[in-house]
């Protein structure tokens, strides 16, 4: 009996597997988003689901679709092709190698979705940097590449070129030459007759000689950690965001990764606080970075803002007389008015937000769906003015409007005002 049950079970598994494959072939044949979605919904864990998912993503052909696929199958059979597509989308609107390099550097330092294919993006960036260095074909361009990508696959090739350059320049100097190309492989320099003085050739020979004493390929792990630490020590007190960005480009997996990213976040938050110049931004900075680079400045500015109070003035008419409506779709009488906000001597800005209710002559409130109308923030700089225009019409003759303005100044002092206008 148990063998019979086992036989039925095996038959069922085989039948189910054949059904999946048949549905898979049907979905491939139909080759539509609808067919793919139907298969994925029915067989979410099938051996064919990943292939259907990548076909679906490629058919939609957007970076979000590829990103969703990589999120579900980060190490799947089709992940490599998906990652290539993802990087293609990143570079799609970027024309020129330099623009692509700049974008990918920023993307790696400030990742949003780059974790889906971080190694591949780094490899793509290194390739672009190598092609640029090779096209420039100067000693400085090669040394720059080796400095920032000491473990890249192209380093051996560049080290060989640099060694050849050194030997060749030594030969030229020994023979009394004062011009020629830097490298045998860079024929374009010969064709364009680029001339270099003997002084410049000696300078480049010295650069190469110094570099070849400590070739990148000979660095061991301990030496790299020592150099990494020394470079971190040089920048750890810097208040320049770029210093930390360049450090992370060179050491993306640095032992000091947390500290460096924290410095970048601190500088960004401080820049935002200075831009907004509002007590809450400084308070937030102080709360998060109690020993930060700008802590003294933040405390000083916060104290100054709190010690000053905006002098708020609001001007509006107490009554408005109706006029013929200037609009064909607005009935008469028409009641327009202007509210003017000003800051008159406090030395700091303020902002208010209004909530308006209009009443008819019987005292019945009116508003959108029976509620008050909300007006957005009005921001008034110190010593300046801001105006707000509104109106009502028709059956409100004999009624009035109230606007409740609430807010605060940059020092955190509350503002509460009532504006009341009658219609006649």
Image (cartoon, rainbow, N blue to C red):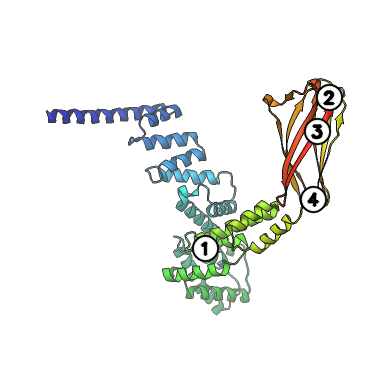
Of mark 2 and mark 4, the one earlier in the sequence is 2
Q: Look at mark 4 in the image and give the residue it sits on.
A: 382
Which structural element holds mark 1?
helix
Of mark 1 and mark 3, the one earlier in the sequence is 1
Find residue 420 and name its label: 3
Distance in Å between CA atoms under marks 2 and 4? 34 Å
Which structural element holds mark 4?
loop
Disc 4 crowd, CA 10 A, few/some/many (<14, 14-19, 20+)? many
Distance in Å between CA atoms under marks 1 and 2? 69 Å
Front position in the image: 356 or 51: 356
Q: Would you place residue 320 above or below residue 160 in this image?
A: above
Which structural element holds mark 3?
strand
Of mark 4 and mark 3, the one earlier in the sequence is 4
Q: Look at mark 1 in the image and give the residue it sits on.
A: 148
Task: Please identify the quadrant where the C terminus is shown.
Answer: top right
Q: Is residue 276 visible?
A: yes
Determine which quarter of the picture holds residue 368. top right
- Cβ–Cβ below 8 Å for labels 2 and 3? no
Front position in the image: 26 or 249: 249
Q: Position of residue 6 (x, y in %)?
A: 16, 31
Q: Look at mark 2 in the image and give the residue it sits on.
A: 334
Of mark 1 and mark 4, the one earlier in the sequence is 1
Q: Position of residue 414 (x, y in %)?
A: 72, 46
Kindly report which numbered mark, 4 or 3, lies closer to the viewer in this rendering.
3
């Amino acid at each position: 009996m148990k063998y019979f049950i086992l036989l039925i079970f095996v038959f069922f598994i085989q039948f189910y597997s054949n059904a999946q494959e048949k549905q898979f072939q049907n979905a491939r044949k139909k080759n539509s988003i609808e067919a793919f979605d139907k298969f994925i919904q029915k067989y979410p864990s099938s051996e064919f689901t990943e292939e259907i998912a990548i076909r679906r993503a490629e058919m939609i052909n957007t970076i979000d679709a590829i990103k969703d696929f990589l999120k579900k199958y980060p190490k799947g059979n089709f992940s490599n092709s998906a990652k290539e597509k993802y990087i293609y989308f990143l570079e799609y609107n970027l024309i020129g190698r330099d623009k692509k390099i700049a974008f990918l550097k920023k993307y790696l330092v400030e990742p949003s979705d780059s974790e889906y294919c971080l190694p591949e993006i780094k490899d793509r960036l290194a390739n672009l940097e190598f092609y640029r260095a090779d096209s420039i074909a100067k000693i400085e361009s090669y040394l720059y590449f080796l400095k920032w990508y000491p473990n890249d696959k192209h380093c051996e090739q560049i080290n060989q070129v640099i060694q050849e350059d050194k030997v060749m320049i030594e030969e030229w100097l020994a023979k009394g030459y004062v011009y020629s190309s830097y490298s045998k492989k860079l024929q374009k320099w010969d064709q364009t007759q680029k001339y270099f003085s003997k002084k410049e050739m000696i300078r480049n020979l010295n650069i190469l000689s110094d570099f070849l004493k400590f070739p990148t390929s000979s660095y061991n792990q301990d030496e790299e950690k020592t150099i990494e630490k020394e470079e971190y020590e040089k920048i750890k007190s810097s208040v320049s965001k770029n210093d930390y960005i360049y450090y992370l480009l060179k050491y993306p997996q640095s032992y000091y990764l947390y500290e460096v990213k924290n410095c970048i976040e601190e500088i960004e938050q401080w820049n935002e606080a200075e831009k907004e110049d509002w007590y809450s931004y400084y308070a937030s900075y102080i709360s998060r970075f109690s020993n930060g680079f700008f802590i003294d400045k933040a405390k000083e500015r916060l104290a100054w803002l709190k010690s000053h109070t905006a002098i708020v003035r609001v001007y509006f008419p107490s009554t408005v007389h109706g006029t013929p409506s200037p609009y064909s779709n607005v009935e008469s009488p028409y009641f327009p008015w202007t509210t003017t906000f000003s800051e008159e001597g406090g030395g700091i800005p303020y902002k208010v937000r209004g909530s308006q209710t209009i009443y008819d002559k019987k005292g019945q409130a009116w508003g959108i769906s029976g509620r008050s109308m909300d007006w957005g923030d009005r921001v008034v700089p110190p010593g300046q003015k801001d105006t707000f225009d509104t109106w009502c019409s028709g059956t409100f003759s004999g009624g009035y409007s109230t606007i409740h303005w609430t807010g605060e100044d940059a020092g955190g002092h509350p503002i509460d005002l009532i504006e009341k206008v009658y219609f006649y």
